[in-house]
Amino acid sequence: MTSKIGFIVNPVAGMGGRVGLKGTDGVVKKAEELGARPVAPIKAEQAVKEFLSMHHEGDVKWFTCSGVMGEDELKKAGVKDIKIVYFLKSGEIGTTAEDTKKVCKKFLEENVDLVFFCGGDGTARDIFEVVKDKTPVLGIPSGVKMHSGVFGINTSASAKMLHEFVNKRLTIGDVEILDLDEEKYRKGEWNIRIFGVAKGIIEPTYVQVGKTVFKSVSDDEIKDELSEHIADEMNMHPDYLYIFGSGGTIDYIAKKIGVENTLLGIDAVYKKKLVGKDLNEEGLLRVLDKHPKAKVILSPIGAQGFILGRGNLQLSPRVIKRIGLDNIIVVSTPSKLISTPVIRVDTGDKQLDHEFAEKEYMMVVIGYKLSRVVRIQTNNF
């Protein structure tokens, strides 16, 4: 039986990440001015190519939008059986929420079996507003914000899940659609909302769990220990630059040692003084030119386990290669690790992901001079 797949690409999703804009909602032109380049079309094409390498195209019919919102990527991947259900006006790149919603209405009219999309939480939200729980949704992660439970953990996982779905070997269940207010996010406020419950694929190996925000008074004592550990680390290596990642745990540590940290940005500290605030990829590379010996401090996203590839795209493969895998310090409270069975990495660079996979495990600091061994999961399952 032929499977009907609705395919949609948000071509600007993720563009704001490396240039430090924490998203592209309303700031696409600014991202372009800062040198951002589209990443979603590339990831979408890769995912479809990987799917085709596993699955015979003949029993899948693709429904999509014209141009860069799906048609181009499918053709580049080698798909031949394509039905265009929505046409963009000549010259348009189709990045509006309205375009996405109109395409999804056409998908419902065609009774597609699955909406397969490439984007972030904003795209997932726009799709959900139309399809609700009528049709399952599966995402290829390409945005800056990806907290919803509809995304594969990386491009390869999304391709494998589509293959398993078409072969009717996966369970469909309820998943949360979440989104974060980008305007507040850029100001340092973490305001995540639940928009609703969609139908998604339930497969914990390949699907990221919706983000869990840990707020516990008892955790503060552990965070104090983590702060002492990092302070000792900085005292022992005074000639190193320290790059502080984003998130609540890192923010707590930074403030505890006297650094005014950017909660949802990436900062650079040398001799316990801020030398770079809310840096984008180029800013990080410039500060590394001045201070080539560097370490980066990261904390996994609760329940998902990502330390790279979600919310910190400024820490690009170029930046991580300059720092070195052995100079990554991962910190976490034990309560967060209870629901974080693996450390996940999705850098977008297969060779770099392979280097992480070869390590197999990372030491995660969970207290003062106390660490736990946690397995690494990347594109190389």
Image: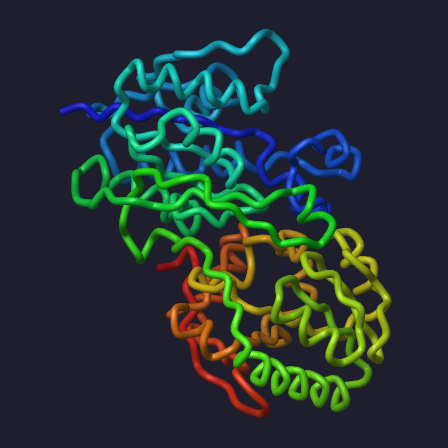
Q: Give the farthest residue toward the left.
A: 1
Quarter of the figure with the N terminus? top left
Report whether 273 appears left or right of 221.
right
Task: Return the residue nearer the eye: 154 or 372.
Answer: 372
Q: In this picture, is 336 found above or below 65?
A: below
Above/below status of 151 relative to 119: below
Task: Answer left or right for 280 relative to 330.
Answer: right
Q: Residue at x 67, y 46 (%)?
A: 22
The percent coordinates of residue 257 (x first, y second) are: 76, 80
Q: Give the residue displayed 79% in from the left and 65% down from the top.
A: 288
- Among the 4 quarters of the image, the one containing residue 263: bottom right
Compared to 113, does 242 lie above or below?
below
Q: Quadrant of the C terminus?
A: bottom left
Percent x, y for residue 322? Answer: 69, 64
Toward the top, the furthest residue is 90
Of 244 and 223, nearer the camera is 223
Of the pair 213 and 340, the residue shown nearer to us: 213
Percent of width and height locating residue 287: 82, 63
Residue 222 is drawn in which quadrant?
bottom right
Residue 175 at what x, y percent from top left?
Answer: 34, 46
Report the label total: 0
- Residue drawn 53% across and 68% down? 215
User: In the image, 332: left or right of 261?
Assistant: left
Residue at horizontal 73%, vertical 36%?
Answer: 31
- Nearest the viewer among 80 and 158 is 158
Quadrant housing residue 182 = top right
